[in-house]
């Protein structure tokens, strides 16, 4: 596999920036601005929440939003679908799984027969032969594009 250090470095830089650096500072900035615009201007809120209003309100709210994103909305499913469509490696894993699961089931049935000291019939041998041919064909045709 050809490795392009420039693009790999760019990817790692973007991950470090967006996940760790920019995200943390954006969260602190948003909570601070919200505190000064919403809570500090309303003395009764400031009395109730005190100086700990930013984490008391912000963190549970953001946890709820993250939970809703993954568990209660269709947005994460759409993201996952797009990632599988766009990433040839994920797509290949999906295709391999679709091919291998029926093969595993068929092999399991044959193993059960053998473990019960049953002889394999001509039909079983034909299934094994067909399974081998199907897997050979799949291996020969597979591509990652």
Image: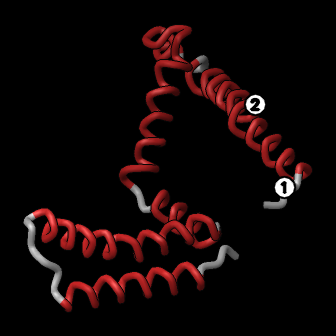
Q: Is residue 122 above or below residue 87?
A: below
Q: Nearer the viewer, residue 87 or 3?
A: 3
Instruction: Count the numbered circles shown.
Output: 2
Position of the C terminus, as image quadrant, is bottom right
Q: Is residue 69 above or below residue 36?
A: below
The residue shown at (51%, 61%) is 80
Q: Earlier in the sequence, mark 1 or mark 2?
A: 1
Q: Is residue 83 above or below residue 54?
A: below
The picture places residue 110, in percent across and down from the top left corner, at 20, 73
Q: Is residue 48 left or right of residue 80?
A: left
The residue shown at (36%, 53%) is 72
Q: Quadrant of residue 114?
A: bottom left
Q: Say the numbered circle drawn on residue 46.
A: none
The picture places residue 77, in percent across and down from the top left corner, at 46, 62
Q: Quadrant of residue 33?
A: top right
Pointer 1: what residue?
3
Tell me whether the residue at label 1 lies in contact with that at label 2, contact meaning CB atoms closer than 8 angstroms: no
Pointer 2: what residue?
21
């Amino acid at each position: 596999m050809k490795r392009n250090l420039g693009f790999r470095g760019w990817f790692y830089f973007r991950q470090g920036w967006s996940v760790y650096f920019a995200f943390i500072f954006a969260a602190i900035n948003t909570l601070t601005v919200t505190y000064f615009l919403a809570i500090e201007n309303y003395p009764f809120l400031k009395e109730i929440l005190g100086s700990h209003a930013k984490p008391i309100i912000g963190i549970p709210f953001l946890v709820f939003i993250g939970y809703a994103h993954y568990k209660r909305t269709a947005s994460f499913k759409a993201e996952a679908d797009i990632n599988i469509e766009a990433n040839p490696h994920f797509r290949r894993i999906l295709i391999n799984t679709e091919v291998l699961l029926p093969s595993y089931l068929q092999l399991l049935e044959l193993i059960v027969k053998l473990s019960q000291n049953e002889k394999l019939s001509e039909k079983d041998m034909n299934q094994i032969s067909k399974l081998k041919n199907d897997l050979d064909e799949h291996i020969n045709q597979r591509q990652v594009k």
